[in-house]
Amino acid sequence: MSNIKSGKAAARKKAVSAEAAALPSEAELARVEAAAPKPSRKGSDPVSAAKPARSKAKRSSAGGSTVSPRKAAAPAAGTSGAETLASPISVFQIYFAPSQQSALDAAFTPLDNSGVADPLLEFAVLRDLAQRPAVRKSRLWGAVSWKFREKTGMQGQSYLEQIEAHPGFDVYYCNPYPENEGLYASPWQQAFAKHPGFRLLSAQVLSASGQDPRVLDDLVPSVRFSSCNFFVGNAKFWDSYVPFVESFVNNAKQSLPTSVLDVLNSRNADPHGLHPGASYWPFIIERLFTLYVAKHHGDIRAFKVKLPGPEAKLNAHVKRLREMKDVAHHTKSQWLSSCWLQYRNLFLLHAAGQEWCRLHLKDLTPSRLRFG
C-alpha cells in the first residue's frame, strides 16, 4: 500500500473536476492514514475492507408493536407455500434446495423455488406471486432470500415488528449493506466494480427502455439506497412496481441490438461465481427500485427498515462519508459532493489499494454528480 504522499497524489489525479474543493488538510490526511483499514490482500474488496471486526454486542430490534409468530411449516405436497397463506402480512422466503431449509426463518413462509429456471431470478418469483389471488388477499406481502438472516443480521420477527410499528406506507425495504451508502454515489455505481462492463451496458439498457442514462451518476441519499429485492408492499405498490419493471425489460429487449442482448444474457456478469449462472438482468433489475422510488415520489410511500447488525459494523469513515453525501444531496451542493468524492477516493486508496483504484476509480468518479 502506498504511503500518504502517494495517496494524496493519486487522489488529486482522480479529482472530480477543476471546480472541486481542495483535499482535506494535512492533519485530516494524517488521521485518515492512521485510522483507515488496511487491505488484507492486494486488490481487495473495499466493502469488505471497510468493515471492522464483528461486534459481540446484542442486536436490538426497532418497533414497539407485537406481531404473532408465523411458523414456517413445510408447504403441503404439490404446493409452493403461496396458495394457502392468508395473513395481514405475508412474507415468503425463497429457497432452492433442501439443504437451505435449515436457514429458513420461522416468521416467514417457505417458498420452494427448486427446479425453476428463469433468467430474471428473484423478480420472476415476485411477478408470479403478484398474480396469485391468495397472495393478494394479504394487506402486505413480499419475499426475501433464504439468506435473509445471514445478510441482514435480523430475525424475521424483528423485521415484521418494524413494519407493524410504522403503518401507512406502501412499501417496506432494507439495505443489508449500508457501507455501500457511504462508498458509492448510487446502487448503480456500486455495481460498476462488481460486474464487468456494467456502466456501458446499463447506459444502453436505460436508453433503450426510455430512461435517462444520466441517472447512473445520480447522488442517491441513504434513505433511498437499496440493491436487493427484500420488499414488503401493498397492492398499490405491487400493481405499480411489477409493470414498471416488466415494461423496462420488454422495451430494452425490443430495442437493443442482438449483440448487446447476447452480452446481457451471458454469464459474464459474475466472474467470481458468487451468483452461479446469473446474467446481467437480475443485477440491473435490483437497481431499478431506486429509480422507481424517485419517479413515484409523492405517490408511493416507502419506508426503509433499519438493520442494527450491519449498522453496528460500519467503519467510522464510512459513517462520515454517508452523512456527508446525504447532506450534499439535501443541500444540492456541488461543492460538498466534490468534497465527498475526494474524501471517498482517498479512503478507497487506503482501504482497497492502488490496483483496485486503478481498475475502478475512473468509472466511480464522474466529472459531475447529479442530485437524483
Image (cartoon, rainbow, N blue to C red):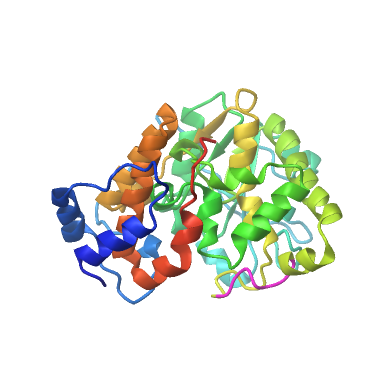
Please give the name of the residue rendered at 57% of the width and 75% of the height, measured from the top-left corner.
271
Query: In the image, 330: left or right of 210?
Result: left
Which one is in front, 71 or 258? Answer: 258
Q: Does 120 appear above or below 142?
A: below
Which one is in front, 355 or 115? Answer: 355
Examine the residues drawn in magenta and state their main secondary structure.
loop
* Quadrant position of residue 115: bottom right
Percent x, y for residue 321? 33, 45
* Quadrant position of residue 243: top right
Asked if the stretch drawn in magenta spans residue 266, the answer is yes
Query: In the image, 147: left or right of 238?
Result: left
Percent x, y for residue 101? 57, 65
Question: Which quadrant holds the N terminus?
Answer: bottom left
* Quadrant position of residue 340: top left
Percent x, y for residue 220? 50, 40
Which residue range is magenta in the image? Answer: 265-271
Q: Does 337 appear above or below 358?
A: above
Q: Does 136 appear above or below 37?
A: above
Query: In the image, 202: left or right of 195?
Result: right
